[in-house]
Image (cartoon, rainbow, N blue to C red):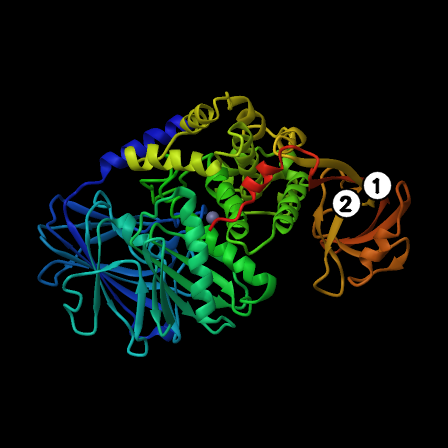
Amino acid sequence: MKKIFLLLSILCIGYKSQAITVDYSLKMSKPQNHYFEVMMTLDELSGKNITIKMPVWSPGSYMIREFSKNINLVRAYDENANKLEINKTLKNTWVIKRNGAKQIRIKYEVYAFELSVRTSFLDATHGFINGSSIFMFVEGATESKGKVDIYPHEDFNTITTSLKKASDSIRYEGAKTYQYKNYDELIDSPIEIGNQEVFEFDAAGCKHTVALYGVGNYEISKLQSDMKKIVETTSKIIGVNPNKKYTFIIHNVNDGQGGLEHANSTTLSVSRWGYTGKEYNDFLSLVAHEYFHLWNVKRIRPIELGPFNYDQENYTSLLWVMEGFTSYYDELILRRAGYISEQEYLQKFNGTLNYLEASEGRKVQPVAHASFDAWIKGYRPNENSANTTMSYYSNGHILAALIDLKIIAKYNGERSLDDFMRILYRKFYLKENRGFTEKEFEETLSSFLKEDMSIFLNDHVYDTKVPDYKSIFENIGIKVELTLNKKNSFGASFDKSSEYPKVKYVRVNSKAEDAGINVNDEIIGINGYRVYSDNIDEAINAFKQNDKFTILVSRDGILFEINCENGIYEQPIYKLSTDFSSEKTNLISYWLRTVN
Ligand SMILES: [Zn+2]
């Protein structure tokens, strides 16, 4: 499989280089109807036909989203405004008969009513553009540069984007003109248009612009100083900040959904009242996470993630490094910046470790497979996912820590994972300007650690063996105790959102599974007594191991009784604590140091 995908990406590289220019204009004359009106102007054309395409996914979010579903009527005209023949040939592809035209104008509308960091949105209050869901590209010309003329609606007075302003940035009345150097850059630069609040700060040699859409309990001066601190701490990991300018677009919404990384910017969706207390640390760790991605995944990256194929899934087994390492760092950065204490950090880390090791999916899905199958499993969960899948974020987070601790122990507190990340950055991004293969990742790690890491990776990345936490942690002076928390358990959990409980999950190898309880079964009664959502847990939890009982269920409108027996569930609990008798406490201090 890997060879096939490598070949595909080589084909894509060879495929891009027709020297045409592609300019876009973007209007929003009636924002309340949620349509962006897009016009593409293609110049210096040759060949018989021109093929245009809409991406099916958005880099950074590994799911096919079929953005062409939101496009209305695509039309093409030559330089004399004559209509050209255009045919749709695939779900995301249109072919235009050029008919000798030197310039072609393509017009289409895009319905934008999904406010998320990966999609686009327009209403009377603002517009947000995630490029891959708005801008089509010309097949064979993704290396072409061009301009984008944005005509904000008259009620909108601010545009925020990391795209550079064109030198003739007011070439049309009512429009602001930006430029892009290739299609990847265009769609990697989200655009916020509206009346957002904007502030700036300088940090790590880079000018940062922050745009906030929506009300929230934030304080600009506090955000300014805290985001600066996070940016500076994050930049110290690699030691070099490659950007001169960076843009944060923040959507304050009812339920924040997280962020999406870009090379020179990020979009964050955060809870509008979450700028206080514990939730505020979650916000800062999201800032750290997306900011660290400007290196890890946008520059330090698997070979499969760029140049992108916008027509289909782009598979990689290394998302555990891209997302897992980034998740590891987003918490570590909070510690390094002094927002949490050593003990708080260890406690949080301990929680992630116990979550991972208690997961059923972790036993059957190696983290390399979780990465590869993000497209069909991680991003598309079903009722059985908890039995069969494990997040490459959490699993990768723990593996990043284990690799970090191995490095710290090996170099006696003078090197860490930071140094390994710097090697990846220099060797593959700066020197070769490309991503690395899995083999190259393994070789680079082995050579840095002066130890064959293939066994570690085979056991814990390509297989599901539980790592020897005890020895790895003890090497840096942290004690690990493992206990089994035994509790009575039936193995089903319930959706209690309505009056009558419905089964929403059946744990693999549980008594509920043995008895034949199905997800979606409505529970009517237990042992002849009526149960409701508010007493189902109490009723089930009253049973001890081996207790027998009957459950009356309604399944697809048929009532029947199921004979059940209660069981036992053993949950592994790891407890990490600083071993003050160890001579290695200096290594813990190095691991959990604050960085000034
Ligand atoms: Zn991420």
> Looking at this view, is 109 or 226 the one in front?
226
The quadrant in which residue 303 appears is top left
Which residue type carries mark 1? Gly
Tell me where residue 478 appears, x and y as whole percent: 66, 37
The quadrant in which residue 395 appears is top right
Is label 2 in a helix, a strand or a loop? loop
> Looking at this view, is 169 or 552 the one in front?
169
In the displayed structure, 379 sits above or below 420; it is below
Q: Which mark is residue 567?
A: 1
Farthest residue, direction bottom: 155
Q: Which residue is mark 2?
A: 491
> Looking at this view, is 142 or 85 the one in front?
142
Q: Disc 1 vs disc 2: Cβ atoms closer than 8 Å?
A: yes
Query: Is 549 on the left or on the right of 332, as rendered?
Result: right
Tell me where residue 537 appears, x and y as whole percent: 81, 56
Please give the name of the residue rendered at 17% of the width and 73% of the height, measured from the top-left corner. Answer: 173
> Looking at this view, is 161 or 144 the one in front?
161
